[in-house]
């Protein structure tokens, strides 16, 4: 079996399109189609169903896709380990970051990566937990920073931080008492029952913060008053800034705002809403030395970046 043909098939199957795969692989589409067809002839199986909208794996194709990812990964591991014998940590590391954290850690993580792994290639992807968990499952991501990740035999999870969610409001708003004088460095507290009465701007389910907020409110017999469902972090902060509602997020989320001075933070009590920040990777794939080094880099950079907001 030709490894290049296998790589081409895997990319087409993952992207669902010869056109998108040809762009990603930087190869002409006719040549890509020919190589995949040669693989099908060799295996005496139709691996892809060609449609007007793209290409979908057949049952045989799904089976080869599952094995193909593992084969290609093991080849990459072998290459990296051979490079490590020469003292070179190389290869590609793909890391997923949540939108609330991405802006805060992207630069320091990239700088640390270039300093300590100069021969390796870093790929950063921003996305919500559900998409990143799928990326880990299919092998598009080597590791991801997730909130309140579900424990699973398929995933290795390390806790990075346990943090409080806070109420984020427009600074000039009186609705949540934001206009009251607050001692610098301290946050005026508000009970969760009071938060439940406010118009909230929350992401749609199954966002980790949405599920956490609803779950904590249920424990005290309340339901959130959701005025808007918005899945974009910057969009949520823009709407809060305009006084359209309030958000419940980690305090360091404001690092994404153009001017954090336009917002007021309030600590939520009775009870507090605690979120767990975790670093997750697939337990089905062996980590290369490069990836092990990258795991330690992610841990140290993330913890250092959020420390001022604790």
Image: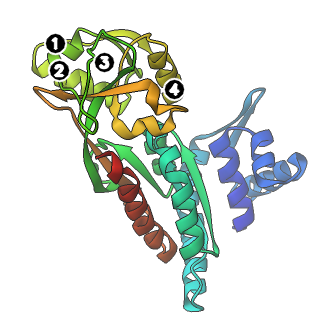
- What mark, if any, has residue 97 been given in the picture? none
What is the CA distance from the residue labelled 1 to the residue labelled 4? 25 Å
- What mark, if any, has residue 222 been given in the picture? 1
Tell me if 202 is positioned left or right of 33 in this view: left
| Callout 2 touching callout 4 (CB < 8 Å) | no
Which percent across, then down, holds residue 285? 44, 64
Tell me if residue 127 comes above or below residue 68 in the rendering: above
Q: Secondary structure at mark 2?
A: helix
Q: Residues within 10 Å of mark 3 (few under 14, many from 20)?
A: many
Q: Tell me the mark number nearer the camera, choosing from 4 and 3.
A: 3
Tell me if 144 is positioned left or right of 111 in this view: left
Q: Which residue is mark 2?
A: 192
What is the CA distance from the residue labelled 3 to the residue labelled 1? 22 Å
- What mark, if any, has residue 232 been given in the picture? 4
Tell me if residue 51 comes above or below residue 63 in the rendering: above
Which percent across, then down, holds residue 44? 70, 54
Q: Residue at x 43, y 44 (%)?
A: 133
Q: Residue at x 57, y 73 (%)?
A: 115
| Callout 1 touching callout 2 (CB < 8 Å) | yes
Q: Earlier in the sequence, mark 2 or mark 3?
A: 3
Q: Earlier in the sequence, mark 1 or mark 2?
A: 2
Q: Which residue is mark 3?
A: 178
Q: Earlier in the sequence, mark 1 or mark 4?
A: 1
């Amino acid at each position: 079996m030709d490894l290049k043909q296998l790589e081409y098939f895997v990319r087409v199957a993952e992207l669902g399109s010869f056109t998108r795969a040809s762009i990603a692989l930087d190869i002409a589409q006719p040549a890509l189609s020919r190589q995949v067809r040669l693989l099908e002839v060799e295996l005496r199986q139709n691996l892809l169903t060609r449609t007007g909208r793209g290409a979908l794996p057949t049952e045989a194709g799904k089976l080869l896709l599952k094995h193909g990812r593992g084969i290609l990964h093991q080849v990459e591991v072998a290459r990296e380990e051979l490079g490590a014998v020469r003292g070179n940590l190389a290869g590609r590391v793909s890391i997923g970051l949540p939108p609330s954290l991405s802006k805060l850690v992207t630069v320091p993580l990239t700088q640390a990566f270039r300093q300590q792994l100069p021969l390796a290639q870093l790929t950063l992807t921003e996305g919500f937990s559900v998409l990143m968990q799928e990326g880990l499952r299919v092998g598009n991501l080597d590791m991801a920073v997730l909130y309140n990740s579900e424990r699973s035999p398929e995933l290795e999870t390390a806790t990075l931080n346990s943090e409080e969610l806070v109420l984020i409001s427009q600074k000039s708003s009186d609705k949540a008492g934001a206009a009251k004088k607050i001692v610098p460095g301290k946050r005026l507290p508000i009970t969760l029952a009071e938060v439940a009465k406010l118009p909230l701007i929350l992401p749609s389910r199954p966002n980790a913060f949405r599920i956490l907020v609803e779950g904590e409110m249920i424990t005290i017999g309340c339901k959130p008053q959701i005025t808007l469902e918005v899945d974009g972090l910057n969009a949520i902060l823009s709407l809060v800034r305009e006084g359209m509602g309030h958000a419940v997020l980690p305090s360091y989320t404001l690092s994404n705002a153009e001017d954090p001075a336009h917002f007021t933070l309030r600590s939520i009590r009775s009870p507090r809403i605690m979120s767990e920040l975790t670093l997750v990777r697939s337990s089905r794939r062996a980590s290369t030395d490069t990836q092990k080094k990258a795991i330690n880099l992610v841990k140290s950079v993330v913890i250092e970046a959020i420390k001022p907001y604790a």
